[in-house]
Image (cartoon, rainbow, N blue to C red):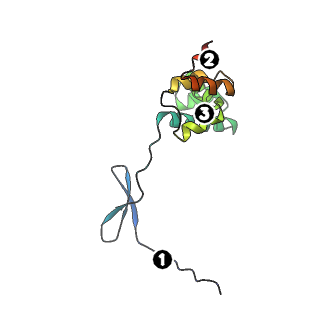
Amino acid sequence: MEPETYVIHLPLKPNRRAGRKYLIAPDGSTVPATGKTPQLHTMQKTLIRAFLWRREIEQGKYDGITDLARKLRLGDEFVLRQLKLTFLSPSIIAAILDNTQPRYLTLQDLYGLTSLGWDEQETAMRQGTSQGAEN
């Protein structure tokens, strides 16, 4: 005999207050829906945006970088610089998304790393900056 399944319906209404999610019970009391929502930092947001734009171009939503830049009202150079971040080493990308990248690593360093091969990127990152790209 299989165990019975019970479905319980709770009349809770999700809501936001000051940017935080809350559940509002029928009696009007509020409870935070989740713990503290982690905030993405600039490098994470930039990487996510770059991969999104790359996917949209590859799927044919935009004809190319110029079309993407024009429709987003951004400069071609800015869009190209962001898209170059998709050529970073997978281990560097994973470290940034996991928020385990070295604290001294900056977004400017990442832009400099894009012209290197993956092994060279990781070596330059361990050395502290992308100065290896300039040699």
User: Which quadrant would residue 75 be assigned to in this image?
Assistant: top right
Tag shown at residue 8: 1
Whether residue 23 is situated above or below residue 19 in the rendered picture = below
| Residue drawn at point x = 35 percent, y = 62 percent | 31
- Quadrant of the rendering where the N terminus is positioned: bottom right
| Residue drawn at point x = 57 percent, y = 80 percent | 5
Circle 1: residue type? Ile
Which percent across, then down, holds residue 81?
Answer: 58, 24
| Residue drawn at point x = 63 percent, y = 25 percent | 123
Circle 2: residue type? Ala
Residue 33 seen anywhere in this rendered image of the structure: yes
Mark 1 neighbour density, 10 Å: few (under 14) some (14–19) many (20 or more): few
| Residue drawn at point x = 52 percent, y = 28 percent | 73
Dot placed on the residue nearer the N-terminal end, 1 or 2 = 1
Dot placed on the residue nearer the N-terminal end, 1 or 3 = 1
- Quote the CA–CA distance across marks 1 and 2: 60 Å
Q: Given this view, does label 1 or label 3 mark the residue nearer the observer?
A: 3
Mark 2 neighbour density, 10 Å: few (under 14) some (14–19) many (20 or more): some
Whether residue 83 is situated above or below residue 115 in the rendered picture = below
Element marked by disc 2 = helix
The residue beneath circle 3 is 92
- Quote the CA–CA distance across marks 1 and 3: 45 Å
Tag shown at residue 133: 2
Circle 3: residue type? Ile
Mark 3 neighbour density, 10 Å: few (under 14) some (14–19) many (20 or more): some
**Viewer-side residue, 125 vs 60:** 125
- Quote the CA–CA distance across marks 2 and 3: 16 Å
